[in-house]
């Protein structure tokens, strides 16, 4: 039985909004323009994603449940539900919601367990932890690795209040994957290199998928899906152009 993380239970799109005691307007600031009504703004974002082709109910539910504004600086919170990437510090960015939804839907296309969720998933590039929180709602366990200590710690701080039991944050170099959690039903990379490291295909379960930005021969970055059909059969599909931060070696 998969345990449902506690935090979205309060946030279910279908459920009634929690009733908060009314305070005089003067003492109730709306932080960054997204206060108690963030659910409505998020619902609009999700409606747009659905109109653009995101049709997996699990992905729709996850995108509607995770409060993206909690993962960006308060000064940027009013842009949290626009379809744009935003700076998260140390020269890195949180991916656009449409890209997070697209990658999540693509990785779910791989082997799924009963109930529609994926088993164990590896994310390369935790950043602020937003995509890890989304993945936690569509997978049994999420291992998310980040090479920059400052961001690893930021993600830890962002995720702590959400109490998501099935996200495991790792500080390390994701170029080598994360052997301890392997084999993975899916691997999602939020940073792009010239090729998909061999360690990722090795740590992927047969039937699983890797979704990653890769710089193609033309010098353009594109989203690539690799399906592991058998130990020897890796099927690669090149999809649309994307703009991700570079995949780098080592930790810092
Ligand atoms: N999914 C993230 C997006 C973060 S941007 C989010 O939701 O916020 C991509 C991240 O990949 C950056 O934080 C960058 O430091 C990290 N990264 C780049 N190369 C890496 C590597 N080899 N191992 C782990 N993380 C890496």
Image (cartoon, grey):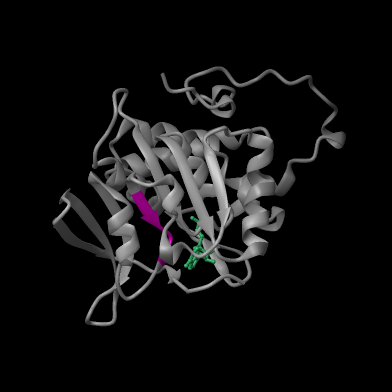
Direction from residue 178 to residue 90 in the image, left or right: right
Determine the residue positioned at 39% across, 40% down. Answer: 120
Viewport quadrant of the N terminus: top left
Considering the whole magenta stretch, tell me its main secondary structure. strand
Q: Is residue 80 visible?
A: no
Q: Residue 131 placed where, x, y %?
A: 48, 48
Instruction: Looking at the picture, tell me which residue is in the foreground, 13 or 26.
Output: 13
Q: Residue 229 placed where, x, y %?
A: 14, 48
Position of residue 47 relative to residue 128, above or below, is: above
Direction from residue 216 to residue 151 in the image, left or right: right
Q: Tell which residue pokes out farthest to the front in this image.
A: 180
Q: Residue 87 placed where, x, y %?
A: 59, 65
Determine the residue positioned at 29% across, 35% down. Answer: 56
Determine the residue positioned at 42% across, 39% down. Answer: 46
Direction from residue 79 to residue 113 in the image, left or right: left
Position of residue 81 relative to residue 222, above or below, is: above
Q: Which residues are magenta?
A: 187-191
Specify the quadrant of the image occupied by residue 183: top left
Viewport quadrant of the C terminus: bottom right
């Amino acid at each position: 039985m998969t345990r449902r993380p506690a935090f979205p239970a309060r946030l279910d799109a279908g459920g009634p909004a929690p009733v908060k005691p009314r305070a005089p307007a003067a003492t109730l600031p709306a932080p960054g323009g997204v206060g108690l009504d963030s659910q409505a703004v998020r619902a609009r974002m999700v409606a747009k994603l659905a109109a653009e082709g995101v049709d997996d109910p699990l992905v729709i539910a996850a995108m509607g449940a995770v409060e993206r504004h909690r993962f960006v600086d308060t000064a940027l919170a009013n842009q949290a539900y626009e379809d744009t990437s935003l700076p998260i510090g140390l020269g890195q960015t949180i991916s656009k919601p449409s890209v997070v939804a697209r990658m999540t839907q693509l990785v779910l296309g791989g082997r799924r367990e009963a109930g529609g969720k994926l088993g164990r998933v590896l994310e390369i590039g935790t950043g602020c932890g937003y995509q890890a929180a989304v993945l936690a709602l569509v997978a049994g366990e999420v291992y998310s690795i980040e090479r920059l200590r400052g961001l690893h710690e930021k993600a830890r701080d962002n995720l702590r209040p959400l109490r998501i039991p099935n996200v495991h944050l790792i500080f390390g170099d994701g170029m080598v994957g994360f052997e301890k959690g392997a084999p993975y039903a899916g691997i999602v990379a939020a940073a792009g290199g010239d090729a998909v490291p061999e360690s990722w295909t090795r740590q992927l379960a047969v039937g699983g998928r890797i979704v990653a930005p890769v710089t193609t021969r033309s010098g353009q970055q594109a989203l690539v899906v690799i399906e592991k059909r058998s130990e020897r059969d890796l099927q690669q599909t090149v999809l649309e152009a994307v703009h991700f931060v570079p995949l780098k070696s080592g930790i810092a």
